[in-house]
Image (cartoon, rainbow, N blue to C red):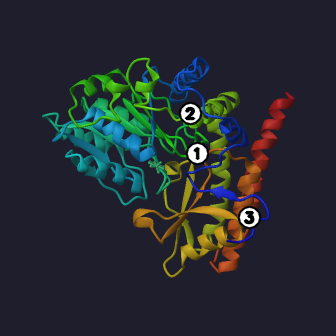
Amino acid sequence: MPINTGRNFLHTPGPTNVPERVLAAMMRPAVDLSDPAYLAMIQTCFEDLGRVFRTDGRIFIYMSNGHGAWEAALVNTLSPGDKVLAPEVGHFSRNWAEMASVFGVEVDVVSSDWRYALDPEVIEARLRADTSGEIKAVLMVQTDTATAITSDITAVRQAIDAAGHPALLMVDVVASLAAAPFDMDAMGVDVAVAASQKGLMQPPGLGIVAANDKAWEAHGKATLPRLYWDWTRRAGDEYYRRFCGTSPIHLLYGLREALDMLLEEGLDNVVARHGRLAEGVRKAVEVWSRGNVLEFNAIEPADRCDSVTTIRIAEGYDVDVLRLACRGELDLSLGAGLGDLGGRAFRIGHLGYLNEAMVLGALATVETALTVTGIPYEAGGVNAAIRHFAETHRAQLANAAE
Ligand SMILES: *Cc1c(COP(=O)(O)O)cnc(C)c1O
Protein backbone atom coordinates (compact mmCIF):
# COMPACT_ATOMS: atom_id res chain seq x y z
CA MET A 1 0.00 0.00 0.00
CA PRO A 2 1.29 3.48 -0.79
CA ILE A 3 1.66 5.79 2.17
CA ASN A 4 -1.40 7.95 2.42
CA THR A 5 -0.33 11.59 2.60
CA GLY A 6 -3.68 13.29 2.13
CA ARG A 7 -7.31 12.60 1.52
CA ASN A 8 -8.26 9.69 -0.71
CA PHE A 9 -10.61 10.74 -3.49
CA LEU A 10 -13.45 8.28 -3.79
CA HIS A 11 -15.09 8.64 -7.20
CA THR A 12 -16.77 5.27 -7.48
CA PRO A 13 -20.52 5.53 -8.06
CA GLY A 14 -21.14 3.60 -4.90
CA PRO A 15 -19.92 3.38 -2.29
CA THR A 16 -19.76 7.15 -2.16
CA ASN A 17 -18.15 9.55 0.30
CA VAL A 18 -19.60 9.34 3.79
CA PRO A 19 -19.75 12.83 5.30
CA GLU A 20 -17.99 13.39 8.63
CA ARG A 21 -21.36 14.38 10.10
CA VAL A 22 -22.75 10.94 9.25
CA LEU A 23 -19.69 9.16 10.64
CA ALA A 24 -19.91 11.20 13.83
CA ALA A 25 -23.60 10.40 14.23
CA MET A 26 -22.82 6.68 14.13
CA MET A 27 -20.01 6.96 16.67
CA ARG A 28 -22.05 6.08 19.74
CA PRO A 29 -22.78 3.17 22.04
CA ALA A 30 -25.51 0.70 21.09
CA VAL A 31 -28.90 1.44 22.60
CA ASP A 32 -31.73 -0.65 23.98
CA LEU A 33 -33.78 -1.71 20.96
CA SER A 34 -36.97 -0.55 22.63
CA ASP A 35 -35.64 2.79 23.87
CA PRO A 36 -38.45 5.27 23.14
CA ALA A 37 -36.11 8.02 21.94
CA TYR A 38 -34.47 5.58 19.53
CA LEU A 39 -37.85 4.35 18.26
CA ALA A 40 -38.99 7.93 17.72
CA MET A 41 -35.81 8.59 15.74
CA ILE A 42 -36.46 5.55 13.51
CA GLN A 43 -40.02 6.70 12.88
CA THR A 44 -38.70 10.00 11.52
CA CYS A 45 -36.40 8.05 9.17
CA PHE A 46 -39.38 6.24 7.65
CA GLU A 47 -41.24 9.55 7.30
CA ASP A 48 -38.34 11.46 5.79
CA LEU A 49 -37.50 8.63 3.38
CA GLY A 50 -41.06 9.12 2.12
CA ARG A 51 -40.13 12.76 1.48
CA VAL A 52 -36.99 11.75 -0.40
CA PHE A 53 -38.84 9.21 -2.56
CA ARG A 54 -41.73 11.71 -2.70
CA THR A 55 -44.32 9.11 -1.86
CA ASP A 56 -47.15 8.50 0.58
CA GLY A 57 -46.58 4.78 0.08
CA ARG A 58 -45.08 2.28 2.49
CA ILE A 59 -41.34 2.28 3.18
CA PHE A 60 -39.35 -0.83 4.09
CA ILE A 61 -35.79 -0.73 5.38
CA TYR A 62 -33.67 -3.88 5.15
CA MET A 63 -30.23 -4.71 6.44
CA SER A 64 -28.93 -5.39 2.95
CA ASN A 65 -27.38 -3.84 -0.10
CA GLY A 66 -29.16 -2.97 -3.34
CA HIS A 67 -29.30 -6.61 -4.39
CA GLY A 68 -31.32 -7.38 -1.29
CA ALA A 69 -33.71 -4.55 -2.06
CA TRP A 70 -34.08 -5.92 -5.62
CA GLU A 71 -34.99 -9.30 -4.17
CA ALA A 72 -37.47 -7.73 -1.76
CA ALA A 73 -39.25 -5.97 -4.64
CA LEU A 74 -39.52 -9.20 -6.64
CA VAL A 75 -40.55 -11.71 -3.98
CA ASN A 76 -43.18 -9.42 -2.51
CA THR A 77 -45.04 -8.75 -5.74
CA LEU A 78 -44.61 -11.79 -8.01
CA SER A 79 -45.53 -15.47 -8.19
CA PRO A 80 -43.72 -18.38 -9.85
CA GLY A 81 -44.51 -18.44 -13.58
CA ASP A 82 -45.30 -14.71 -13.73
CA LYS A 83 -43.74 -12.75 -16.54
CA VAL A 84 -41.86 -9.44 -16.28
CA LEU A 85 -40.68 -7.06 -18.96
CA ALA A 86 -37.05 -6.05 -18.47
CA PRO A 87 -35.75 -3.18 -20.61
CA GLU A 88 -31.96 -3.63 -20.54
CA VAL A 89 -29.64 -0.64 -20.72
CA GLY A 90 -26.71 -2.04 -18.80
CA HIS A 91 -25.24 -4.43 -16.30
CA PHE A 92 -27.64 -3.55 -13.48
CA SER A 93 -30.83 -3.89 -15.48
CA ARG A 94 -29.53 -7.23 -16.78
CA ASN A 95 -28.71 -8.48 -13.30
CA TRP A 96 -32.05 -7.53 -11.78
CA ALA A 97 -33.80 -9.42 -14.58
CA GLU A 98 -31.51 -12.43 -14.06
CA MET A 99 -32.44 -12.40 -10.39
CA ALA A 100 -36.11 -12.59 -11.35
CA SER A 101 -35.48 -15.64 -13.52
CA VAL A 102 -33.80 -17.44 -10.61
CA PHE A 103 -37.14 -17.20 -8.80
CA GLY A 104 -38.97 -18.89 -11.66
CA VAL A 105 -40.26 -15.65 -13.12
CA GLU A 106 -40.25 -15.54 -16.91
CA VAL A 107 -38.24 -12.59 -18.15
CA ASP A 108 -38.99 -10.83 -21.40
CA VAL A 109 -35.84 -8.77 -22.06
CA VAL A 110 -35.93 -5.67 -24.23
CA SER A 111 -32.31 -5.65 -25.28
CA SER A 112 -30.13 -2.79 -26.46
CA ASP A 113 -26.51 -2.12 -27.29
CA TRP A 114 -26.08 -0.27 -23.96
CA ARG A 115 -25.27 3.00 -25.75
CA TYR A 116 -28.73 4.56 -25.95
CA ALA A 117 -31.70 4.83 -23.63
CA LEU A 118 -34.52 2.58 -24.79
CA ASP A 119 -37.32 4.14 -26.77
CA PRO A 120 -40.48 4.00 -24.59
CA GLU A 121 -42.42 3.16 -27.76
CA VAL A 122 -40.68 -0.21 -27.83
CA ILE A 123 -41.88 -0.84 -24.28
CA GLU A 124 -45.38 0.26 -25.28
CA ALA A 125 -45.41 -2.11 -28.27
CA ARG A 126 -44.33 -5.07 -26.11
CA LEU A 127 -47.09 -4.33 -23.64
CA ARG A 128 -49.71 -3.91 -26.37
CA ALA A 129 -48.72 -7.30 -27.75
CA ASP A 130 -49.37 -8.86 -24.33
CA THR A 131 -53.14 -9.04 -24.86
CA SER A 132 -53.65 -11.70 -22.19
CA GLY A 133 -51.96 -9.58 -19.51
CA GLU A 134 -49.22 -12.08 -18.74
CA ILE A 135 -46.69 -9.38 -17.91
CA LYS A 136 -47.01 -8.49 -14.24
CA ALA A 137 -44.28 -5.89 -13.91
CA VAL A 138 -41.89 -3.69 -15.86
CA LEU A 139 -38.41 -3.60 -14.27
CA MET A 140 -36.80 -0.24 -15.04
CA VAL A 141 -33.46 1.09 -13.84
CA GLN A 142 -33.59 4.88 -13.73
CA THR A 143 -29.83 5.29 -13.83
CA ASP A 144 -27.81 2.29 -14.91
CA THR A 145 -24.52 2.89 -13.16
CA ALA A 146 -22.59 0.65 -15.55
CA THR A 147 -23.49 2.45 -18.76
CA ALA A 148 -24.30 5.85 -17.16
CA ILE A 149 -27.53 5.86 -19.13
CA THR A 150 -30.62 7.41 -17.60
CA SER A 151 -34.14 6.38 -18.55
CA ASP A 152 -37.14 8.69 -18.67
CA ILE A 153 -39.42 7.14 -16.06
CA THR A 154 -42.31 9.50 -16.82
CA ALA A 155 -42.19 8.42 -20.47
CA VAL A 156 -42.19 4.76 -19.44
CA ARG A 157 -45.25 5.39 -17.26
CA GLN A 158 -46.95 7.04 -20.22
CA ALA A 159 -46.04 4.08 -22.42
CA ILE A 160 -47.60 1.64 -19.94
CA ASP A 161 -50.74 3.81 -19.72
CA ALA A 162 -50.94 4.25 -23.49
CA ALA A 163 -50.90 0.46 -23.85
CA GLY A 164 -53.63 0.30 -21.19
CA HIS A 165 -51.55 -2.34 -19.41
CA PRO A 166 -51.98 -3.17 -15.70
CA ALA A 167 -48.33 -4.19 -15.07
CA LEU A 168 -46.60 -2.73 -12.03
CA LEU A 169 -43.87 -0.19 -12.73
CA MET A 170 -40.90 -1.15 -10.56
CA VAL A 171 -37.95 1.22 -10.66
CA ASP A 172 -34.40 0.79 -9.40
CA VAL A 173 -33.38 4.22 -8.10
CA VAL A 174 -30.29 2.89 -6.32
CA ALA A 175 -28.00 5.29 -8.19
CA SER A 176 -30.47 8.08 -8.87
CA LEU A 177 -32.28 8.76 -5.59
CA ALA A 178 -31.13 12.13 -4.25
CA ALA A 179 -29.23 12.76 -7.51
CA ALA A 180 -31.75 12.85 -10.36
CA PRO A 181 -35.32 14.16 -10.31
CA PHE A 182 -37.50 11.41 -8.87
CA ASP A 183 -41.06 11.77 -7.69
CA MET A 184 -42.45 8.32 -7.05
CA ASP A 185 -46.12 9.28 -6.74
CA ALA A 186 -46.21 11.89 -9.50
CA MET A 187 -44.33 9.58 -11.86
CA GLY A 188 -46.75 6.72 -11.17
CA VAL A 189 -44.05 4.37 -9.90
CA ASP A 190 -45.47 1.42 -7.96
CA VAL A 191 -42.28 0.07 -6.38
CA ALA A 192 -38.96 1.90 -5.98
CA VAL A 193 -35.72 0.30 -4.83
CA ALA A 194 -32.74 2.08 -3.26
CA ALA A 195 -29.62 1.45 -1.19
CA SER A 196 -27.79 3.50 1.40
CA GLN A 197 -24.31 3.83 -0.11
CA LYS A 198 -25.05 5.98 -3.15
CA GLY A 199 -26.92 9.30 -3.15
CA LEU A 200 -27.95 8.76 0.45
CA MET A 201 -24.28 9.26 1.50
CA GLN A 202 -24.27 6.37 3.93
CA PRO A 203 -22.09 3.35 4.47
CA PRO A 204 -23.34 0.24 2.64
CA GLY A 205 -25.81 -1.79 4.67
CA LEU A 206 -29.34 -0.52 4.13
CA GLY A 207 -31.65 -1.58 1.31
CA ILE A 208 -34.76 0.54 1.02
CA VAL A 209 -37.98 -0.24 -0.83
CA ALA A 210 -41.01 1.99 -1.30
CA ALA A 211 -44.35 0.52 -2.38
CA ASN A 212 -47.66 2.17 -3.20
CA ASP A 213 -51.18 0.78 -2.70
CA LYS A 214 -51.24 -0.96 -6.07
CA ALA A 215 -48.01 -2.79 -5.17
CA TRP A 216 -49.42 -3.64 -1.76
CA GLU A 217 -52.47 -5.15 -3.44
CA ALA A 218 -50.24 -7.23 -5.74
CA HIS A 219 -48.31 -8.29 -2.64
CA GLY A 220 -51.49 -9.80 -1.21
CA LYS A 221 -51.70 -12.21 -4.16
CA ALA A 222 -47.99 -12.84 -4.75
CA THR A 223 -46.80 -16.29 -3.74
CA LEU A 224 -43.02 -16.31 -4.14
CA PRO A 225 -41.48 -17.69 -0.92
CA ARG A 226 -40.21 -14.98 1.41
CA LEU A 227 -39.64 -14.42 5.06
CA TYR A 228 -36.94 -11.86 5.80
CA TRP A 229 -38.15 -9.65 2.95
CA ASP A 230 -41.87 -10.10 3.60
CA TRP A 231 -43.79 -6.82 3.65
CA THR A 232 -46.68 -8.32 5.64
CA ARG A 233 -44.40 -9.50 8.45
CA ARG A 234 -42.90 -6.03 8.53
CA ALA A 235 -46.19 -4.15 8.54
CA GLY A 236 -47.41 -2.52 11.75
CA ASP A 237 -45.68 -0.50 14.39
CA GLU A 238 -43.69 -3.08 16.27
CA TYR A 239 -40.10 -2.30 15.43
CA TYR A 240 -38.65 -5.75 16.08
CA ARG A 241 -41.06 -6.99 13.40
CA ARG A 242 -40.50 -4.00 11.15
CA PHE A 243 -36.87 -5.03 10.83
CA CYS A 244 -37.55 -8.78 11.05
CA GLY A 245 -35.28 -8.84 14.07
CA THR A 246 -32.69 -6.48 15.50
CA SER A 247 -32.61 -3.11 13.77
CA PRO A 248 -29.35 -1.71 12.32
CA ILE A 249 -28.96 0.83 15.13
CA HIS A 250 -25.83 2.63 13.98
CA LEU A 251 -26.77 2.69 10.32
CA LEU A 252 -30.09 4.23 11.27
CA TYR A 253 -28.39 6.98 13.29
CA GLY A 254 -26.24 7.58 10.22
CA LEU A 255 -29.29 7.61 7.98
CA ARG A 256 -30.99 10.15 10.24
CA GLU A 257 -28.00 12.48 9.89
CA ALA A 258 -27.79 11.98 6.11
CA LEU A 259 -31.50 12.73 5.76
CA ASP A 260 -30.99 15.91 7.81
CA MET A 261 -28.21 16.95 5.45
CA LEU A 262 -30.29 16.29 2.32
CA LEU A 263 -33.31 18.14 3.70
CA GLU A 264 -31.19 21.06 4.94
CA GLU A 265 -29.72 21.48 1.46
CA GLY A 266 -33.16 20.93 -0.07
CA LEU A 267 -33.85 18.03 -2.43
CA ASP A 268 -34.15 20.29 -5.46
CA ASN A 269 -30.79 21.85 -4.64
CA VAL A 270 -29.26 18.41 -4.20
CA VAL A 271 -30.47 17.45 -7.68
CA ALA A 272 -29.28 20.76 -9.15
CA ARG A 273 -25.83 20.27 -7.60
CA HIS A 274 -25.58 16.83 -9.17
CA GLY A 275 -26.51 18.32 -12.53
CA ARG A 276 -23.89 21.04 -12.21
CA LEU A 277 -21.08 18.71 -11.12
CA ALA A 278 -21.98 16.13 -13.77
CA GLU A 279 -21.94 18.76 -16.48
CA GLY A 280 -18.44 19.83 -15.36
CA VAL A 281 -17.25 16.25 -15.75
CA ARG A 282 -18.91 15.98 -19.16
CA LYS A 283 -17.25 19.19 -20.33
CA ALA A 284 -13.89 17.66 -19.46
CA VAL A 285 -14.66 14.34 -21.16
CA GLU A 286 -15.83 16.17 -24.27
CA VAL A 287 -12.39 17.77 -24.60
CA TRP A 288 -10.45 14.59 -23.75
CA SER A 289 -12.49 12.71 -26.40
CA ARG A 290 -11.09 14.89 -29.18
CA GLY A 291 -7.93 12.76 -28.91
CA ASN A 292 -10.03 9.95 -30.53
CA VAL A 293 -9.16 7.36 -27.89
CA LEU A 294 -11.67 8.19 -25.15
CA GLU A 295 -15.40 8.61 -25.75
CA PHE A 296 -18.68 8.78 -23.85
CA ASN A 297 -20.46 5.45 -23.61
CA ALA A 298 -23.84 7.17 -23.89
CA ILE A 299 -23.90 8.61 -27.38
CA GLU A 300 -26.85 10.97 -26.93
CA PRO A 301 -26.18 13.79 -24.45
CA ALA A 302 -29.79 13.53 -23.22
CA ASP A 303 -29.20 9.91 -22.18
CA ARG A 304 -26.22 10.77 -19.92
CA CYS A 305 -27.02 10.55 -16.23
CA ASP A 306 -25.87 12.92 -13.50
CA SER A 307 -24.49 10.26 -11.12
CA VAL A 308 -21.59 8.80 -13.08
CA THR A 309 -19.90 9.16 -16.44
CA THR A 310 -18.82 6.03 -18.29
CA ILE A 311 -15.89 6.62 -20.63
CA ARG A 312 -14.94 4.07 -23.27
CA ILE A 313 -11.37 3.60 -24.39
CA ALA A 314 -10.28 2.57 -27.87
CA GLU A 315 -9.03 -0.97 -28.44
CA GLY A 316 -5.33 -1.45 -27.77
CA TYR A 317 -5.25 0.65 -24.61
CA ASP A 318 -5.35 -0.92 -21.17
CA VAL A 319 -7.95 0.91 -19.18
CA ASP A 320 -7.19 -0.95 -15.98
CA VAL A 321 -3.62 0.35 -15.99
CA LEU A 322 -5.15 3.83 -15.89
CA ARG A 323 -7.51 2.94 -13.07
CA LEU A 324 -4.82 1.22 -11.05
CA ALA A 325 -2.41 4.12 -11.55
CA CYS A 326 -5.09 6.41 -10.15
CA ARG A 327 -5.80 4.22 -7.17
CA GLY A 328 -2.27 3.06 -6.44
CA GLU A 329 -0.25 6.20 -7.13
CA LEU A 330 -2.60 9.13 -7.11
CA ASP A 331 -5.12 8.44 -4.34
CA LEU A 332 -8.11 8.54 -6.69
CA SER A 333 -10.57 5.65 -6.92
CA LEU A 334 -12.49 5.38 -10.18
CA GLY A 335 -15.12 2.83 -11.21
CA ALA A 336 -14.14 -0.06 -13.49
CA GLY A 337 -16.05 -1.04 -16.62
CA LEU A 338 -18.78 -3.52 -15.69
CA GLY A 339 -20.35 -6.43 -17.55
CA ASP A 340 -19.89 -6.10 -21.31
CA LEU A 341 -17.86 -2.95 -20.65
CA GLY A 342 -15.28 -4.81 -18.51
CA GLY A 343 -11.78 -3.79 -19.66
CA ARG A 344 -13.27 -1.37 -22.17
CA ALA A 345 -14.32 1.56 -20.04
CA PHE A 346 -13.78 3.38 -16.78
CA ARG A 347 -16.23 5.42 -14.78
CA ILE A 348 -15.96 8.68 -12.91
CA GLY A 349 -18.53 8.72 -10.13
CA HIS A 350 -20.01 12.10 -9.26
CA LEU A 351 -22.67 10.95 -6.86
CA GLY A 352 -23.33 11.91 -3.27
CA TYR A 353 -21.29 14.08 -0.95
CA LEU A 354 -19.25 16.12 -3.45
CA ASN A 355 -18.49 19.68 -4.43
CA GLU A 356 -16.69 21.47 -7.24
CA ALA A 357 -13.29 21.35 -5.58
CA MET A 358 -13.47 17.58 -5.21
CA VAL A 359 -14.62 17.10 -8.80
CA LEU A 360 -11.88 19.38 -10.13
CA GLY A 361 -9.33 17.44 -8.09
CA ALA A 362 -10.55 14.18 -9.58
CA LEU A 363 -10.57 15.50 -13.15
CA ALA A 364 -7.08 16.94 -12.82
CA THR A 365 -5.88 13.63 -11.41
CA VAL A 366 -7.42 11.72 -14.34
CA GLU A 367 -5.55 14.03 -16.72
CA THR A 368 -2.37 13.34 -14.75
CA ALA A 369 -2.92 9.59 -14.97
CA LEU A 370 -3.72 9.74 -18.69
CA THR A 371 -0.41 11.48 -19.19
CA VAL A 372 1.49 9.02 -17.00
CA THR A 373 0.03 5.98 -18.75
CA GLY A 374 0.46 7.42 -22.25
CA ILE A 375 -3.21 7.29 -23.16
CA PRO A 376 -3.82 9.97 -25.80
CA TYR A 377 -6.29 12.72 -24.91
CA GLU A 378 -6.76 16.33 -25.84
CA ALA A 379 -5.56 18.52 -22.99
CA GLY A 380 -7.83 21.18 -21.57
CA GLY A 381 -10.59 19.08 -20.02
CA VAL A 382 -10.03 20.51 -16.57
CA ASN A 383 -10.14 24.05 -17.97
CA ALA A 384 -13.47 23.30 -19.63
CA ALA A 385 -14.84 22.11 -16.29
CA ILE A 386 -13.49 25.23 -14.57
CA ARG A 387 -15.22 27.43 -17.16
CA HIS A 388 -18.50 25.59 -16.61
CA PHE A 389 -18.33 25.94 -12.84
CA ALA A 390 -17.27 29.58 -13.12
CA GLU A 391 -20.22 30.39 -15.37
CA THR A 392 -22.79 28.70 -13.14
CA HIS A 393 -21.38 30.35 -10.03
CA ARG A 394 -21.17 33.74 -11.67
CA ALA A 395 -24.87 33.43 -12.45
CA GLN A 396 -25.55 32.39 -8.86
CA LEU A 397 -23.56 35.30 -7.44
CA ALA A 398 -25.41 37.71 -9.71
CA ASN A 399 -28.75 36.30 -8.56
CA ALA A 400 -27.72 36.60 -4.92
CA ALA A 401 -26.71 40.24 -5.45
CA GLU A 402 -30.10 41.17 -6.88
C1 LIG B 1 -25.08 -0.13 -7.03
C2 LIG B 1 -26.29 -0.49 -7.80
C3 LIG B 1 -27.02 -1.65 -7.55
C4 LIG B 1 -26.55 -2.72 -6.62
O1 LIG B 1 -26.39 -2.30 -5.33
P1 LIG B 1 -25.51 -3.16 -4.32
O2 LIG B 1 -25.65 -2.39 -3.06
O3 LIG B 1 -24.13 -3.21 -4.85
O4 LIG B 1 -26.13 -4.50 -4.22
C5 LIG B 1 -28.18 -1.85 -8.23
N1 LIG B 1 -28.61 -0.98 -9.14
C6 LIG B 1 -27.93 0.12 -9.44
C7 LIG B 1 -28.45 1.04 -10.47
C8 LIG B 1 -26.74 0.40 -8.77
O5 LIG B 1 -26.05 1.51 -9.06
Q: Residue at x 56, y 56 (%)?
A: 309
Secondary structure beneath disc 2?
helix
Instruction: Determine whether, in the image, residue 102 is placed left or right of residue 393.
Output: left
Placement of 189 over or under 147, stated as above or below: above
User: What percent of the width, then of the height, locates residue 185?
Assistant: 44, 24
Residue 364 image label: 3
Q: Earlier in the sequence, mark 3 or mark 1?
A: 1
Secondary structure beneath disc 1?
loop
- Quick check: marks 3 and 1 in contact, CB under 8 Å? no
Front: mark 3 or 2 = 2
Q: Which residue is mark 2?
A: 249
Q: Which residue is mark 1?
A: 203
Q: Quadrant of the C terminus?
A: top right
27 or 122, nearer to the observer: 27
Q: Residue at x 65, y 49 (%)?
A: 17
Residue 36 visible in the current orientation? yes
Front: mark 1 or 2 = 2
Marks 3 and 1 sit apart, C-alpha to C-alpha, by 27 Å
For badge 2, the amino acid type reads Ile
Placement of 231 over or under 127, stated as above or below: above
For badge 3, the amino acid type reads Ala
210 or 184, nearer to the observer: 210
